[in-house]
Amino acid sequence: MNIYKEQESNVWKTWFLMSLFLVIIIGIGWTFSYIYGNPIILVVAVVFSLVMNVISYWYSDSIVLSLYSAKPVTREDYTDLWNITENISISAGLPMPKLYVIAESQPNAFATGRDPKHSAVAVTSGLLEILNRSELEGVIAHEMAHIGNRDTLLQTVIVVLVGFVALLSDFFMRSQLLGAGKRDSDSKAGGVIVLVGIVLAIIAPIAVTLIQLAISRKREFLADATGALFTRYPEGLAMALQKISADTKPMRMANHATAHLFISNPFGAKKSLMNLFATHPPVVDRINKLMGK
């Protein structure tokens, strides 16, 4: 696959998702403004959708990092990690990303950011404990490949937009359970609120699944291959993947909406096999490709 075409494709997919979110929220706002005869509702929906698109583009990386309580590190804190990332950045021709460590025993890592100049790589403390230098180079190169391929823009925006669809679903369903719409239960408005809540409740998990499927096996294979080019040592990443996959315990803070960000399934090898299938190719296939088998 042509890397430049992949980069362009990811940018277009991101704008499509943001536009779709805009249309959905405005559509919901128009429906309620029509039902209640109040145009202010539509104005609020337009403003809300625009604000959420701005937040998802500019701040989605910060949101994801905060979800995992990732702590920024310096060269003095983690000298090897810093030097490895700096060297790979130079060989890949990419800016040095910000580095974060997550206090989590499961070995894992992910990259985030809207573009290479505003990127970050987060690794778990468990990853740093079990990998040697060449293996860690392989993992960092894989994450740098995601940054260079513009995967991070698409992956991180997805987390925020899908998350807010889930929040909207929860809001509508809870408003009915708490009786917020009782006075309208016999009216068109009450019926529409219930309908919107049900639709969003159905859409939210389906959207997560479909989007995880969109983060295809092809993208992970491409990041593996590109990372191997950066290090000129595919065996490093292959051995790292072998060690990472051997750890079957799930992350304490594992989240279905963010599972596709990680280099390996955060729910562990023995859990959520459908998510593993959707977001990550089998480790043995990735290792075989890296080793030219």
Image (spheres, grey):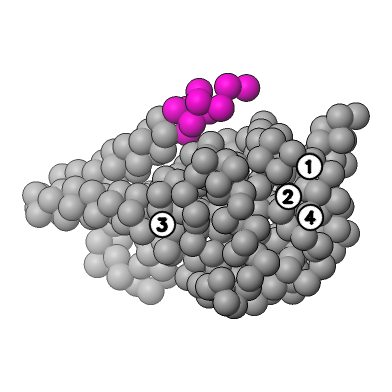
Residue 153 belongs to magenta span: no
N-terminal of the pair, mark 1 or mark 2, is 2
286 to the left or right of 215: right
7 to the left or right of 235: left
Q: Which mark is residue 60?
A: 3
Looking at the rendered structure, the secondary structure element under dot 3 is: helix
The residues tagged by marks 1 and 4 sit, at their Cα atoms, a distance apart of 9 Å
* Labelled pair 1, 2 in contact (Cβ < 8 Å): yes
* Labelled pair 1, 3 in contact (Cβ < 8 Å): no
Q: Estimate the x, y position of residue 289 in percent, counting from the top left.
A: 82, 32
N-terminal of the pair, mark 1 or mark 4, is 4
Give the labeled residue for mark 1: 233
Looking at the rendered structure, the secondary structure element under dot 1 is: loop
Amino acid at dot 3: Ser
Q: Which mark is residue 135?
A: 4
Please report the bounds of the magenta region as a residue range: 1-10
